[in-house]
Image (cartoon, rainbow, N blue to C red):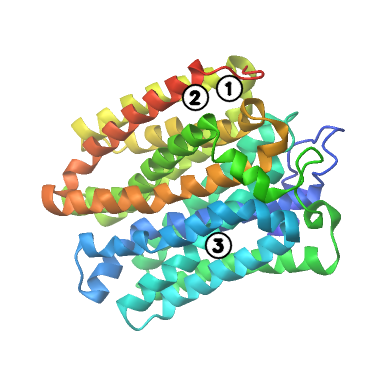
Amino acid sequence: MLLILAGVMKPPRLSRRSTAHSRIGVAIALYAFIAIGSAEGGLGVLLPSIWTTYGISPATVTLLFISQITGYVVAAFSSSVISQRLGLARMLLVAALTLAIALLTYALSPVWSVMVIAGTLLGLGIGLIDAGINTYIASDQQNATLMGVLHGFYGIGALLGPTIATFLLSADWNWRSIYLVFASIVGLLAIAALWAVVTNYRPLTKPIATDDHPNAWSSLRQVVRTPVVLVMGLLLLVYVGTEASIGNWAYAVQTIGRDLPTQTAGYSVSAYWLGLTIGRFALGQFVARLGAVRVVTLSLLLLLIGLLCWWQLPQVWLSLPLIGFALAAIFPTTIWLVPQRVAPAIVPAAIGLITSVASLGAAIIPTSVGWIADRAGLEQIPALMLLLAIGLLALHAWLVQRPAKSLP
């Protein structure tokens, strides 16, 4: 797989100034996002099987999301420090092993409480990978396309996750065996990171730091006192929570709340991730033509339309890929804008904090949605997502009004 990414698929052409980004380094970064995308994307299809196995309710199964919060918080406040001290490759190795152990525990846990505890490791692994890779790619401000492609590969992973889960469940596989497949996918990332460490592959082993502000702890203290960073973190927290809530709950909404056939529901979730993937691969063209800020604005307006259709037209499953397409640009474009909105010295710490705080949304918001749906009914989830989209639009409007160095 990594050889295919490095050669056959050929990452986007890198500018001469992008000396930190070699072909192999980009291939490993892209595969890392496939790995975390598949691990996260498959959960939504597997949730009903999990709560049936353990005899728990949809509200109780949200403990799986809550347990991830601790790991995300640790990643938020340590990713920039770890990457500076160890370099990206060693941090990726630790993170991939942590994530693989969490997925293996999901597959093998004899009791529900053990699976819940493993969620902390899952949150830590995903948080560190997300922060490290985003910082690595965002360091090249000459190539917005590469950021879009990176998150497009997350979409590929998130598309593969529910597709693999739906296909294997249809073939009478147990959900535990499916998690072994996901653990194997992450295991390949650990092997790639180990290769980079052993060979001292310089693009991934050198510490991520700036000459202006080499102390990661000092940068972190400055970041948490910067309002624009905190608002970007909040925006992406709500965004990730919205994306994850739809990915995790859409299958249950379509099957249990709306009585659609299981295969139709499963593949409609895959279509949601397909829409997101297509949008991210097209991101570079949209940014070049419209500008980054305008792309986010238009994406949020399209998101409102898609969610309104999902809420009011329950039988029209095409609303899900439209929602995925609308969501596509928001995260990568916001990350790409970080070096334009904050001082260069604190960019690594800012991206590390923003991406890891954003990961909290994958735990907090789907959990809250699950609790509300347990009382109000699964069919109310589309309306809840519409409210979150309105909140995203308000946060984006605040950021647009703030002065920045060079907003396009």
Could you tell me the amino acid type at mark 1?
Ala
In the rendered view, tell whether residue 172 sits above or below residue 203.
below
Residue 170 picture quarter: bottom left
Residue located 73% across and 54% down the image: 84
**Which residue position is annotated with label 3?**
125
In percent of width and height, residue 109 lies at: 39, 80
Other residues around mark 2 within 10 Å, as few (<14) / some (14–19) / many (≥20): many
Q: Secondary structure at mark 1?
A: helix
Q: Within 10 Å of the Cα at label 1, are there few (<14), some (14-19), or many (20+) other Cα atoms?
A: many
* Residue at the image point whose x is 18% and y is 42% from the top: 380
Position of 121 with respect to 170 (left or right) is right
Quadrant assignment for the C terminus = top right
Instruction: Give the residue displayed 58% in from the left and 65% down from the top.
Output: 185
Quadrant location of the N terminus in the rendered image: bottom right
Q: Earlier in the sequence, mark 2 or mark 3?
A: 3
Eyeballing the image, is 386 above or below 272? above
Q: Which residue is mark 2?
A: 296
Residue 115 location (% of width, % of height):
38, 74
Secondary structure, mark 2, is: helix
- For the question of whether residue 389 can be seen, the reply is yes
Where does residue 358 sit, x and y in percent of width and height?
47, 45
Q: Nearer the viewer, residue 311 or 319?
A: 311
Instruction: Name the residue carrying label 1.
Output: 292
Alpha carbon separation for disc pair 1 and 3: 29 Å
Q: Amino acid at mark 2?
A: Val
Q: Secondary structure at mark 3?
A: helix
How many neighbours does mark 3 have within 10 angstroms: few (below 14), some (14-19), or many (20 or more)?
many
Whole-number angstrom distance, CA of label 2 to CA of label 3 = 28 Å
| Residue 41 image point, x, y percent | 44, 54
Residue 173 in view, yes or no: no
Q: Nearer the viewer, mark 2 or mark 3?
A: 3
